Amino acid sequence: MIDLLDLHKYFILKHLREGDVAVDFTMGNGYDTAFLSQTVGERGKVYAFDIQAAAVESTRRHLEEIGAPKNYTLIHASHHLVKDYVKEPIRAGMFNLGWLPGGDKSITTLRETTLPAIQAAIELLDRDAILNVAVYPGHEEGDAEGKMICEYLASISRYKVCATRINILNSPTSPYFIMIETKP
Ligand SMILES: C[S@@+](CC[C@H](N)C(=O)[O-])C[C@H]1O[C@@H](n2cnc3c(N)ncnc32)[C@H](O)[C@@H]1O
């Protein structure tokens, strides 16, 4: 069976290399930040965003516990403000939408900030870069968020980015993901 998160990483690793710059747009408990940090190594750089102080602390603890390279900047701010903090092209970005696992389910990603964040992220993409967005259509806001993102991406020129969606056809409420890639 396909494991969505394994696939997510498989595609990111087609683009992201040691020394690159990456962004975790939804740091949560830091598992994706850790993956990016370990992939780009000491010479690389990772920026990670979350609106919850508890997520920033949980991520900091996790990165220290696993001895991740000290290449990360943890930012307590909404991801739609990414351009205030990241001034260089990025090779990979991860959005894992929804709420903090084990946290307050009322604090979730929302359409009004998710879309501007994705638009800003696309503008920051380097050549041969990728953005991955994990969507959770099993709850109302997640479903609406996913539809909005797909509609927006379908309207962008194929010559600017290639946008692909991977979902389980016979399980429509299961998570799915969207990849946005630039050419080498
Ligand atoms: C599904 S969790 C992310 C899981 C995480 N990537 C991990 O590896 O543990 C979604 C996170 O997005 C955060 N979030 C919600 N709205 C946000 C926003 N506008 N900007 C940045 N983070 C946001 C939530 O606080 C939550 O921690």
Image (cartoon, rainbow, N blue to C red):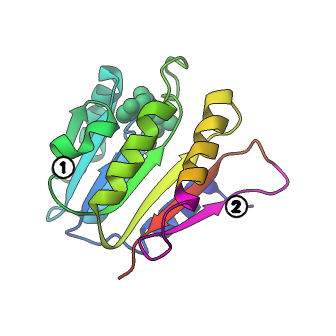
**Residues packed near mark 2 inside 10 Å, few (<14), some (14 to 19) or many (20 plus):** few
Amino acid, disc 2: Ile
Residue 157 forms part of the magenta stretch: yes
Q: Which residue is mark 2?
A: 2
Residue 94 forms part of the magenta stretch: no
Predominant SS of the magenta segment: loop
Q: Is residue 37 visible?
A: no
Q: Is residue 95 visible?
A: yes
Q: Secondary structure at mark 1?
A: loop
Q: Which residue is mark 1?
A: 86
Q: Secondary structure at mark 2?
A: loop
Q: Residue at x 34, y 23 (%)?
A: 52
* Front position in the image: 116 or 137: 116
Q: Quadrant of the C terminus?
A: bottom left
**Residues packed near mark 1 inside 10 Å, few (<14), some (14 to 19) or many (20 plus):** some
Above or below, 169 against 29 in this view is below
Q: Which residues are magenta?
A: 153-171
**Residue 51 at x, y = what percent?**
33, 26
Q: Residue at x 51, y 34 (%)?
A: 111
Q: Residue at x 22, y 35 (%)?
A: 75
